[in-house]
Each structure stands twice: as structure tokens, then as C-alpha cells.
């Protein structure tokens, strides 16, 4: 059964009548399944007994008159004023299963996701080997053992500064690539041969608040001569 989307009370009278009838049958049969008592079911059933005949009159052209329309509108307002508090109470009751709530046509409570925090540790970079135009680089966490990454981190973002001498400031480095595995191959751009490539890296998460990735602090620089 699909999960209902807002609003859970159908706007069209025909759909409202069908929904109300189903809800009334389910709650009347076993009110305790929904955290209610028999008296609550009686109140809901009484509203249905007022609403349904008022609605049925309008399905017959001979009785679809202005006074009957007005009576139907009043019956619906009164019915909703009774149903909404019960529906909200059932929806918020953790002891009532999601399946029963969906069976009544209610929306489920939104799940509150815990945002992934920004990583607090740094990757430690090292050069394993170097060939023409490339470097084999490894990284590991400054605190965790082996190839473990901080919680929520999917890899590192690598930034590189090219110059005649190493630098210690990542602010001057440019984004190179996102790396998820270690060891990895870093390819140097054409025209940078003979320069010093100072590498900086920081952990990156898959997503954070509002779906935005978060970054950890910068690693120590790794200076490498581009061959």
C-alpha cells in the first residue's frame, strides 16, 4: 500500500466519504489497536452516521438542493473537527505500527535524520612512487588505523599548488580531484614538469545538512617534484 501524501484528508467529498468509511470500520472493529477506546470509536461512528447520509443526498439530482448542500458542508466541517485530533493522536502514537497508520490513510511522521558531521581528523599523504607525468600516492587517517576513514567520509579532496618551491598554505592550491581509495594515481597536468607540486588534502563527506558535503581540516603539505 503506498504511503499517503499530504493532505491525508481527501479534499473531494466522494474521496472523503470513502476514506471516512474505511477509517470508521477499522477503528470501530479494534479501537485499541490504534491507542483508542470503545468510546472514541462511538464518537467517530456517530459523526459518520451524520456525514454519510448528508453526502448521499447530493449524489441524487433530485435531492441535490442548496439546503442539502449547506447541510453536507456543515456535516463535513463537524466531522473533520472530530477526526483531525484523533488522526493526529494516532499518528503520533509510537505504539501504533506504521502499517496500521498507513491503513487508515494517515501520513507517517517524517524521519529526522542525524546530519553527518564534518570530519575532525586529517589524511596523512605520502608518495609511493613517481613516473613521468604521474605519482602513486597513498593516504591514511591521522588517528584511525589501517585504511579506515572518519565517520561519514567517502574519501579526500586533493588540492595542488605548482611553483618553484614548496608552500605551506593550502589557500593558494587548486582543486585536483576527489579520491576514494588508497593507493591512487595522481596525474600531473601537461606543462608542469620540473615544478614542485605541493599537495594538500582534506576529508569530504557524502552529504551534510541540506545535502551539502562537508570537509575536514587540511592535511600537512606533501611536496613532490613533477617529473
Image (cartoon, rainbow, N blue to C red):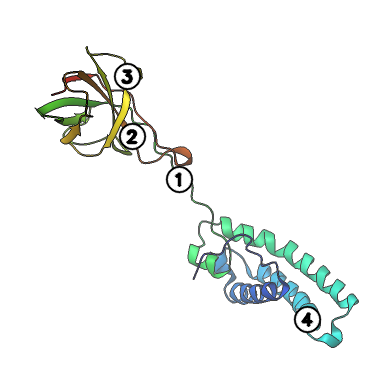
Disc with the residue nearer the chain's start (3 vs 2): 3
Q: Looking at the image, tell me whether mark 2 or mark 4 is earlier in sequence order.
A: 4
Q: Which one is in front in this view, the residue at disc 1 or the one at disc 4?
A: 1
The vertical placement of 165 against 22, above or below, is above
Circle 3 packing at 10 Å, graded few (<14), some (14-19), many (20+), is some
Mark closest to the chain's N terminus, 4 or 3: 4
Find residue 64 and report its image quarter. bottom right
Marks 3 and 2 in Cβ contact (< 8 Å): no
Q: Secondary structure at mark 2?
A: strand
Q: Which of the two discs, 1 and 3, labels the residue nearer the N terminus?
A: 1
- State which mark lies toward you, 3 or 2: 3
Tag 1–tag 3 contact (CB < 8 Å): no
The answer to whether any part of residue 221 appears in the image is yes
Residue drawn 85% across and 85% down? 63
Q: Quick one: which residue is furthest to the front in this view? A: 191
Q: CA distance from mark 1 to mark 3?
A: 33 Å
Q: Which residue is mark 2?
A: 204
Residue 34, compared with residue 171, is above or below; it is below
Q: Is residue 71 left or right of residue 20?
A: right
- In three-dimensional space, the C-alpha distance between marks 1 and 4, rounded to whole angstroms, equals 45 Å
Quick one: label 2 or label 1, which is nearer the N terminus? 1
Please name whichever residue, 42 or 113, is drawn nearer the observer in this view of the structure. 113
The residue at which mark 1 appears reads as 113
Tell me, for residue 170, which label it has, or none. Answer: 3
Which quadrant is the C terminus positioned in? Answer: top left
Amino acid at each position: 500500500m503506498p504511503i499517503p501524501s499530504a493532505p491525508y484528508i481527501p479534499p473531494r467529498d466522494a474521496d472523503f466519504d470513502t476514506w471516512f468509511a474505511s477509517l470508521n470500520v477499522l477503528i470501530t472493529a479494534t479501537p485499541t489497536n490504534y491507542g483508542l477506546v470503545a468510546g472514541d470509536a462511538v464518537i467517530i461512528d456517530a459523526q459518520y452516521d451524520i456525514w454519510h447520509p448528508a453526502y448521499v443526498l447530493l449524489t441524487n439530482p433530485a435531492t441535490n438542493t442548496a439546503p442539502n448542500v449547506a447541510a453536507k458542508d456543515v456535516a463535513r466541517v463537524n466531522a473533520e473537527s472530530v477526526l483531525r485530533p484523533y488522526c493526529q493522536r494516532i499518528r503520533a502514537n509510537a505504539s501504533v505500527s506504521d502499517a496500521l497508520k498507513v491503513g487508515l490513510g494517515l501520513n507517517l511522521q517524517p524521519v529526522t535524520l542525524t546530519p553527518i558531521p564534518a570530519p575532525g581528523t586529517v589524511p596523512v599523504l605520502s608518495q609511493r612512487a613517481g613516473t613521468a607525468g604521474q605519482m602513486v600516492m597513498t593516504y591514511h587517517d591521522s588517528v584511525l588505523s589501517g585504511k579506515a576513514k572518519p565517520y561519514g567520509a567517502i574519501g579526500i579532496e586533493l588540492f595542488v599548488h605548482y611553483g618553484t618551491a614548496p608552500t605551506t598554505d593550502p589557500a593558494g592550491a587548486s582543486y585536483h580531484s576527489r579520491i576514494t581509495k588508497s593507493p591512487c594515481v595522481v596525474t600531473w597536468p601537461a606543462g608542469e614538469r620540473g615544478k614542485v607540486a605541493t599537495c594538500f588534502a582534506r576529508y569530504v563527506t557524502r552529504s551534510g545538512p541540506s545535502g551539502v558535503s562537508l570537509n575536514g581540516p587540511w592535511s600537512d603539505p606533501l611536496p613532490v617534484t613533477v617529473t
